[in-house]
Structures are given as C-alpha cells and as structure tokens.
C-alpha cells in the first residue's frame, strides 16, 4: 500500500480478560429542542469493553416465529469519581488480549482511571496495537470491528502525547485534542469515556453537537477545553459563525476521526475538508483515524489528513466471521396492507419472551415517530429515538434502553452505529435499506456479556423484496417460514380491534403524525426510484396506498395534503394523485393551486399491485 506502513494484527491473545464492567454513568444532558438539522443516517456501534454492571441472562430459547437459516465546586467537564467498577467473571471475548494496561508506559493518573473508574485490567486487540504505535507520535489509520474498544485506543495515546509535550491545562484558550464523531450519540458516549479517563488529570472535556444551543456551547468553550468531541456539521457551524472559534482550533495537536467510514458515508466529506483547513497543517499535528471498514474514500481522506508514511493497523484477522455472518437472519414478506398488523404481531410475540430487548429500525424519523405512536395505541410499550427529538430527549431514551430489559426501542438510523446497546435480542428492520446499513443495524445484536444470541428480521413489502434480495444476496438470510410466520404475514388491522381503532384515530399523537409520516415515506422512496424501477407516478401510487392502509385517506379519498413547495422540492410537480394544498392570499404564484391533483387516478383502485 503506497505511502504507508502496514501492520496486521492476528487473533486475540489467550487468557486475560476484563477486570471490571463499571457503569458508564449518565451522559451530560444539555440543549434545547433540535434546530432542524434533519436526520443524518445512523451509524453502527462502538461498545468499548462491556460497560455497565452485570445483567441477568436473557432468554435465548427458540423464537416464537422461525428466524433460523458532579459536585458544585468542580470546574466544567468534571464530575465526582464514580464508584469503583466491580470485577466481573464474564466470558473472555475473542478480541481481548492478556496484555495489561498497568504495563504500558503511561502516566499514573491514566492508569488509575483505567483501573478504578473504567474498571479495565487488560487491553483489547486494537488497544494493544494502536496505543504503543500512536505513542510514538506518528499518524495511524486503524481498522477494527465496532465494539472492540477503539475509544480508549485513541484517547489514551492522545492524552499521553500532550503530557509528554509538557502540556499544562488552562495555559491557553485552545483545543489541543479534537475528536470528530458522525453522530451525537457517539459524541456523547466518547465524551463520557474521556471524562472518566481524565478524572485524576482534572482536564476539561466538552462536546459540540447538533440539537443543542450554539450560544451555550460558545460560552462553555470561551476559556478553551482540553478534549473536544464534535460532530462535523456543528463544528463547521462554529467555524463559520462563532467569532474566534477557528483561532481556538489552531491549538489542535491531536486530531481523531472516529468511525471514519461512517463520517464519509453520511456525507460529511465537505465539512471534514473545511475543518482540516481550519486546523494546523498536518506536519504540526498527529492524526488518528479509526474505522470499521477502510474503503477507497477513507484512504483518500487519510492521504489528505495525515503525513506521508502513516501506519495502517488492521486488527481484523483474515477470514474472521463478522456479526452479519454469524447472526440468524430472516426476511418476512408482507403486503403493505398487512404490515402494521404484522409489526404489532411480531412485537407482541417477542414481548412475551422473558428478557426481550428489541430494536426496530424504520426508513425515516417521522415514520419512526408515527409507528411508535400507533403501536402504543395498540397496547405496546415502546420507546422511540430519532432525529426529530432534542438531544436531551435522545440521551434519556438511549440511557433507558441501554440499562433496561424487557423493552422495545423504535429508531431511525441514529442508532445504527456508534451506540452501545448491550444484549439486544432482536433487530427488526422495516422497509427498504442498503446492504451497508442493513449490516450496521444488524451489528446491534448480542453486544453484551450475558450470552444472549441476537437475531435479525427484515420486514418488507413485495415491491421491496426483490431489491433487498439482490442487495443482500451474499448474506445468509432465509425466508421466514413456518405456521407462525405465515399467520403473522396474513394478519390484517381489522382483525385487531386496538390497532384498527388506532389507525382510525382522528386526534392525539397518531392523528397529528399521519401527514408527517406520509410525507417522510414519500420523500424516502423518492430517493430510491432507480432501485425499485419506479416512475414518479408509481411512487405516488405506492405512497397513496401506504397512506390508505397506514394513515387513512381524507374524507375526499385523497392522501394527506402536501405543501406546493414540498412537492416542488421532491421533483413531483405535475404528477397526478397528490393532494397539494392551495396557496392562500389570492392564490398567486402557486402554479394554479396545486398542478396535477390527478382527478382521474382515483387513488389506486384496489389493494393489488404488489404494494
């Protein structure tokens, strides 16, 4: 590989293992409701050693349907030391080594925090490889599976580099260590890990992420901070709009791009390039890139961000089985008119299993919110997390699901990567997705130490089945079969009084969210016309059918109304079958008050057509 040294790390060492599983503790809860950034896609899990106390063993028996195939005088960023982590006798993970943190040439304060607060004794494979390599001051590109301790793999050497250089906290109003994370959830998780690691150093940590108040962030950072964790979009906002912020970044000595592949997949490349322009040149800083996969675009950014001769460390042994190769997975094909009933049926069956922990993914944030409200009305206890919630709300829900059992979480892709949810027994994905996102979501299963065997289920409509089979053809996914699966696929809302009543709701959360969910569904599938082989007219027909069976049509037999500007932004102006709101104030400039209302289409005419 040109311009870099390559180090391949084999399987994990024998013996060793964790010395503790200290609780992750509460993440800081700050901020106001989201300011409308919109929902960036999710990312996969981090899961640094199994944080959290021992949990009771989950039910691992057969599925009910076949799926086989701080104190007030502390400065900002500090909190009182958590109680020492208990020593657990859990099974040794295959990514653990027998190399001790205490044997590393690092500061006594760092060792004490690792031992007493984080509760770790031995290193994971990626930690054992990356910490000594990064301590030399060179640039590192490290590849490791999610959930193998990458956070400490970059935080420890970054902190130790600053100590070796004689850094004194508070000496300058700058940011010496900058960590870029693709999602708010991962940023909060990383900041919390840094706070624990730095407790005895008494360095400050902070985060700047979307969904929180920029002025509050600016005030907190006025005197600088030692470790700043940021999402690229919010960091760029500060660079562009906060006076003096770019100058503060001129003090960056160590730059970390965490989950670099996901940063690029989520469209952050322009923001990353802008951020790089605001930092000291690569010759004057150390850059650490950590990633679960290393496609060409990650290597390209590495060449831009890092000095020539950077070291590539691969801790994934050749031929190692990945999560998506070992988890039992099935696909269940259900006509659109039966999907809500099938979803409720699956979740009721799963909720009957002791110790269940179910994570359900939907195609868009507003669809997630609507389906959560619908299922609650149908009698299910459901948590929800998505980009339309404030950061404080998301943190509260994330913490509850992480620590809980016998619970169900509905999510948009904010939970697909980077969030550590242990002991998930079932990942249910509803609707069209990509191969990459499917794999990342599936990676949420069985991340704890209780021995639970996670499962995956993909619930699709007939028009989604073939595209998904093509996308996932190299994966071991079977068709869900058997009497129970068949009976679930045959369910219809009219057979379920609670669900049927919820679908007809004309007030409350369900009614309020119907129009938003329809618009979000239309927008998502509008971006997938080529994969589906659809025309714009096909899309509108399918969306109308989705609205009929999931939301209900208007009294005039039309789908929920859309604003003319929304229709225009989707490129659907003039397409028949849409219910376009007429403009007020004399009607000027709206193109005739709605263009193609499609009076001749009549709203699909029947429930056939594979929808």
Image (cartoon, rainbow, N blue to C red):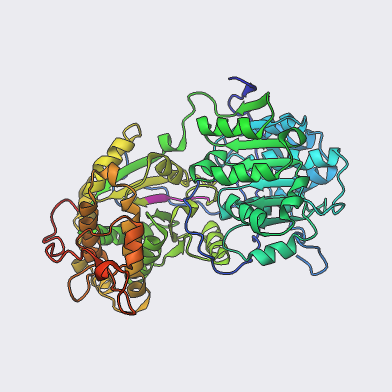
Q: Position of residue 413 (x, y in %)?
A: 45, 52
Residue for point 43% across, 51% down: 59
Q: Quadrant of residue 165?
A: top right
Q: Where's the N terminus, which quadrant?
A: top right
Q: Is residue 429 visible?
A: yes
Does residue 211 show up magenta in the picture?
Answer: no
Does residue 424 show up magenta in the picture?
Answer: yes
Viewer-closest of 525 and 593: 593
Residue for point 56% across, 48% down: 182
Residue for point 42% across, 44% down: 437
Q: Is residue 125 visible?
A: no
Q: In the rendered view, would you say 367 is above or below 59?
A: below
Q: Position of residue 36 (x, y in %)?
A: 50, 63
Write the start and end of the magenta stretch as one range. Answer: 422-428
Say left or right for 430 vs 602: right
Viewer-closest of 594 and 518: 594
């Amino acid at each position: 590989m040109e311009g870099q040294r390559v180090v391949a790390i084999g399987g994990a060492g024998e013996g060793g293992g964790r010395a503790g599983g200290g609780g992750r503790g509460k993440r800081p809860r700050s901020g106001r409701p989201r300011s409308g950034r919109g929902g960036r896609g999710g990312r996969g899990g981090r899961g640094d050693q199994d944080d959290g106390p021992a949990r009771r063993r989950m039910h691992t028996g057969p599925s009910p349907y076949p799926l086989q195939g701080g104190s007030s005088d502390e400065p900002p960023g500090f909190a009182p030391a958590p109680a020492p982590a208990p020593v657990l006798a859990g099974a040794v993970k295959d990514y653990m080594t027998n190399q001790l943190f205490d044997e590393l040439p690092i500061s006594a304060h760092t060792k004490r925090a690792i031992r007493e607060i984080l509760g770790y004794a031995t290193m994971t494979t990626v930690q054992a490889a990356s910490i000594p390599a990064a301590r030399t001051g060179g640039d590192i590109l490290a590849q490791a599976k999610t959930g193998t301790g990458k956070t400490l793999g970059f935080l420890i050497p970054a902190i130790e580099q600053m100590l070796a250089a004689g850094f004194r906290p508070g000496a300058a109003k700058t940011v010496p260590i900058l960590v870029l994370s693709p999602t708010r959830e991962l940023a909060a998780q990383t900041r919390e890990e840094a706070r624990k690691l730095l407790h005895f150093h008494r360095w400050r940590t902070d985060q700047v992420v979307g969904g929180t108040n920029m002025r509050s962030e600016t005030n907190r950072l006025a005197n600088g901070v030692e470790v700043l964790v940021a999402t690229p979009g919010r960091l760029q906002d500060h660079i562009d709009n906060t006076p003096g912020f770019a100058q503060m970044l001129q003090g960056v000595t160590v730059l970390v791009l965490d989950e670099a592949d996901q940063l690029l997949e989520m469209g952050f490349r322009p923001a990353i390039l802008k951020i790089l322009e605001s930092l000291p040149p690569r010759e004057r800083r150390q850059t650490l890139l950590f990633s679960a996969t290393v496609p060409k675009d990650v290597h390209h950014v590495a060449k831009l961000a890092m000095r020539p001769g950077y070291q590539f460390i691969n801790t994934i042994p050749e031929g190692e089985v990945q999560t998506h190769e070992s988890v039992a997975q099935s696909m269940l094909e259900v006509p659109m008119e039966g999907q809500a009933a099938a979803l409720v049926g699956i979740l009721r069956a799963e909720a009957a299993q002791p110790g269940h922990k179910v994570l359900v993914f939907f195609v868009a944030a507003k669809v997630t919110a609507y389906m959560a409200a619908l299922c609650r009305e149908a009698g299910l206890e459901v948590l929800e997390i998505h980009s339309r919630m404030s950061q404080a709300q998301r943190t509260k829900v994330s913490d509850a699901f992480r620590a809980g059992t016998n619970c169900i979480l509905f999510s948009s892709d904010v939970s697909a990567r980077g969030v550590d949810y242990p002991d998930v027994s079932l990942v249910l994905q509803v609707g069209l997705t990509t191969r990459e996102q499917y794999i990342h979501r599936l990676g949420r299963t069985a991340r704890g130490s209780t021995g639970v065997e996670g499962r995956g289920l993909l619930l699709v409509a007939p028009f989604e089945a073939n595209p998904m089979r093509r996308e996932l053809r190299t994966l071991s996914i079977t068709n869900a079969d058997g009497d129970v699966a068949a009976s679930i696929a045959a369910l219809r809302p009219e057979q379920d009084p609670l669900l049927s009543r919820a679908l007809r709701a004309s007030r409350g959360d369900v009614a309020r969210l119907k129009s938003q969910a329809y618009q979000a569904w239309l927008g998502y599938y509008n971006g997938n016309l080529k994969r589906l082989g659809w025309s714009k007219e096909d899309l509108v027909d399918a969306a109308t059918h989705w609205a009929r069976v999931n939301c209900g049509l208007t009294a005039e037999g039309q789908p929920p109304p859309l604003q003319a500007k929304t229709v225009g932004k989707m490129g659907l102006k003039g397409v028949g079958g849409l219910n376009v709101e007429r403009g007020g104030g004399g009607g000027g400039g709206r193109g005739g008050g709605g263009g193609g209302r499609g009076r001749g289409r009549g709203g699909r005419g029947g429930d056939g057509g594979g929808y």
